[in-house]
């Protein structure tokens, strides 16, 4: 199995374990999609690049405030959550969930997923 | 990127045959007396037109009296330098720096390009009866190259510095910005086609 398929399977695993997760996309820091699951072919590059931009802006503002590194970004909307995480040396992972998701549990599972992603990509 | 690096990178984007050359500098300087004799008239008409145009006037209105005086003085220096030279690196650095000032003052590229038209047209008007056809054509070509090169530096510096400010303010790097533009341009194209 190639790395791309392995990454896709890991993202699928997250969705299977947490049905509230609707989709996820992993992008490089330049906004290029590395892997995605649950999003359409046209959604994933847009969501991926915008998530990286959102992370960049958040990092910039927290640097300005001097309040340390960004761990994750939680955007709560009327119908769900968009959670954005940094995968060090790889890029940005964006996870979309329904409104009834347990964000704490998603965080725990995503942190495990991030370790898996790094292992697959040899970081 | 420093202004110097920016100037070099913009120059490199223009074919050498079409940008300003040393020969152009010699031609302009050769006829400087004809053009410099009209300095007051050319600048007076320039500012009269500029101040009669609302979008340009609104920029000048935001400046203090001292700033306006300094702008008028800078234009005089610019005109004299354009005609008299030297057309060396420091002149092109200056034209690049103008791009930065324009971002600050919100002086748009259409305003810059229109202003260059005015200076070119005035030069043509003033030389047409004073030089032979051949000499006039050579001078016009030299002035065209000077204005095209200067306008390219100012306009592209404006754009690049604007992007650099966006990068710095948002933390979004240039590659990501380009990716976002690639994504957005598809939507823009779709809207235009509709």
Image: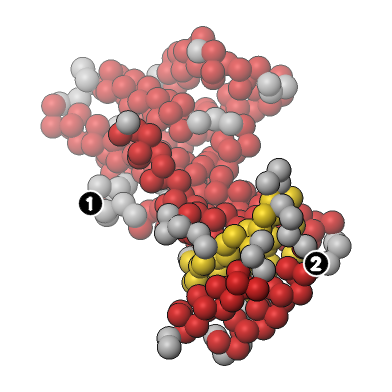
Q: Which residue is label 1 attached to? A: B17
Disc 1: host chain? B
Q: Residues within 10 Å of mark 1 (few under 14, many from 20)?
A: few
The answer as to whether the residues below labels 1 and 2 share one chain is no
| Eye-nearest disc, 1 or 2 | 2
State the image coordinates of residue A83 (x, y, percent, origin top left).
69, 60
Q: In which quarter of the image is residue B130?
A: top left
Give the left or right position of residue A120, taking residue B25 as reference: right
State the image coordinates of residue A79 (x, y, percent, origin top left).
68, 46
Residue under the point 60% across and 69% down: A15
Residue under the point 67% across and 68% down: A18
Q: Quadrant of residue B116?
A: top left
Disc 2: host chain? A
Q: What element carries label 2?
A: helix
State the image coordinates of residue A98 (x, y, percent, origin top left).
67, 55
State the image coordinates of residue A17 (x, y, percent, origin top left).
65, 73
Give the left or right position of residue A58, taking residue A11 as reference: right
Q: In this view, does A108 lie above or below A66?
A: below
Give the left or right position of residue A81, taking residue B71 as reference: right
Q: Is residue A116 visible from the viewing direction of this image?
A: yes
Q: Is residue B36 visible from the viewing direction of this image?
A: no
Residue under the point 51% across and 67% down: A37
Which residue is more in the foreground, B160 or B60? B160
Q: In which quarter of the image is the N terminus of chain B?
A: bottom right
Q: How far apart are marks 1 and 2 (CA)?
A: 64 Å
Which residue is more in the foreground, B77 or B179? B179
Q: Quadrant of the C terminus of chain B?
A: top left
Residue under the point 60% across and 88% down: A119
Which mark identifies residue B183?
none
Check if mark 1's residue and mark 2's residue have beta carbons within 8 Å.
no
Which mark identifies residue A104?
2
Give the left or right position of residue B161, taking residue A86 as reference: left
């Amino acid at each position: 199995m190639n790395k791309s398929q392995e990454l896709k399977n890991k993202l699928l695993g997250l969705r299977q374990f947490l049905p509230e997760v609707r989709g996820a996309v992993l992008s490089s820091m330049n906004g290029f999609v590395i892997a995605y699951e649950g999003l359409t072919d046209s959604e994933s590059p847009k969501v991926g690049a915008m998530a990286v931009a959102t992370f960049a802006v958040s990092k910039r503002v927290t640097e300005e405030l001097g309040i340390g590194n960004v761990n994750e970004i939680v955007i709560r909307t009327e119908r769900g959550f968009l959670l954005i995480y940094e995968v060090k040396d790889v890029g940005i992972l964006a996870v979309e969930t329904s409104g009834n998701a347990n964000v704490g549990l998603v965080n725990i599972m995503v942190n495990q997923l991030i370790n898996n992603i790094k292992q697959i990509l040899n970081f | 990127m420093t202004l110097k690096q920016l100037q070099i990178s913009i120059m490199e984007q223009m074919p050498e045959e079409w940008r300003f050359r040393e020969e152009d500098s010699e031609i302009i300087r050769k006829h400087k007396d004809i053009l410099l004799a009209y300095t007051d008239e050319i600048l007076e008409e320039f500012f009269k037109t500029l101040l009669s145009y609302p979008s340009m006037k609104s920029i000048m209105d935001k400046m203090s009296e001292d700033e306006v005086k300094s702008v008028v003085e800078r234009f005089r220096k610019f005109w004299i330098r354009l005609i008299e030279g030297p057309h060396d690196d420091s002149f092109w650095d200056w034209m690049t720096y103008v791009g930065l000032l324009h971002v600050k003052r919100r002086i748009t590229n259409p305003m810059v390009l229109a202003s260059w038209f005015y200076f070119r047209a005035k030069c043509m008007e003033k030389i047409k009866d004073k030089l032979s056809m051949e000499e006039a054509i050579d001078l016009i070509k030299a002035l065209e190259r000077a204005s095209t090169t200067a306008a390219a530096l100012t306009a592209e510096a404006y754009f690049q510095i604007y992007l650099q400010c966006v990068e710095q303010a948002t933390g979004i790097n240039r590659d990501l910005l380009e990716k976002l533009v690639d994504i957005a341009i598809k939507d823009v194209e779709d809207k235009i086609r509709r």
